[in-house]
Amino acid sequence: MEERIKELEEENARLIGILKKVFPEKSGDIFICGIGGEKDSLGLPENIYVCPSYGLDGFAIYSKTSDYTAPGY
């Protein structure tokens, strides 16, 4: 029973994290407000624009520094 409670607590924490990202206007979490530059073969943009809080006027530009990597199973 304790193991199941632990699993549910972990799932709940993941879902809370997702909801914070989906509703930044409620959580005050960062908000990805745009993309820019060329997209690579996987559709990843060269830049993303991040607002520190939903509804603010400005944004910071974050640039891609490496290609997508996946584990080599």
Image (tube, grey):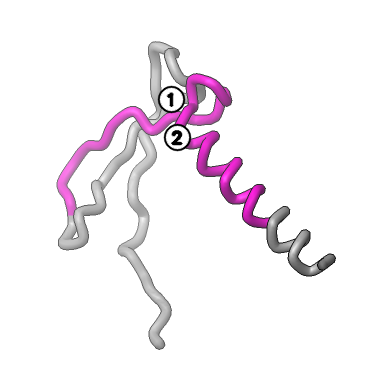
Q: In the shown orientation, is residue 70 left or right of residue 21?
A: left
Q: Residue at x 51, y 43 (%)?
A: 18
Which residue carries the number 1 mark? 51
Per the rendered image, the range of residues in magenta is 10-39
Compared to residue 1, the image places residue 36 above or below, namely above
Compared to residue 72, the image places residue 50 above or below, namely above
Q: Quadrant of the N terminus?
A: bottom right
Q: Which type of secondary structure does the marked residue at label 2 adopt?
A: helix
Q: Nearer the viewer, residue 69 or 21?
A: 21
Q: In the shown orientation, is residue 33 left or right of residue 71?
A: left
Disc 2 packing (10 Å; few <14; some 14–19; many ≥20): few
Which residue carries the number 2 mark? 22
As for residue 16 lying within the magenta part, the answer is yes
Q: Residue at x 29, y 31 (%)?
A: 34
The amino acid beneath tag 2 is Val
Q: Quadrant of residue 58?
A: top left
Q: Nearer the viewer, residue 23 or 7?
A: 7
Q: Which type of secondary structure does the marked residue at label 1 adopt?
A: strand
Q: Residue at x 70, y 63 (%)?
A: 7
Counting from the top left corner in percent of width and height, residue 50 is at 41, 31
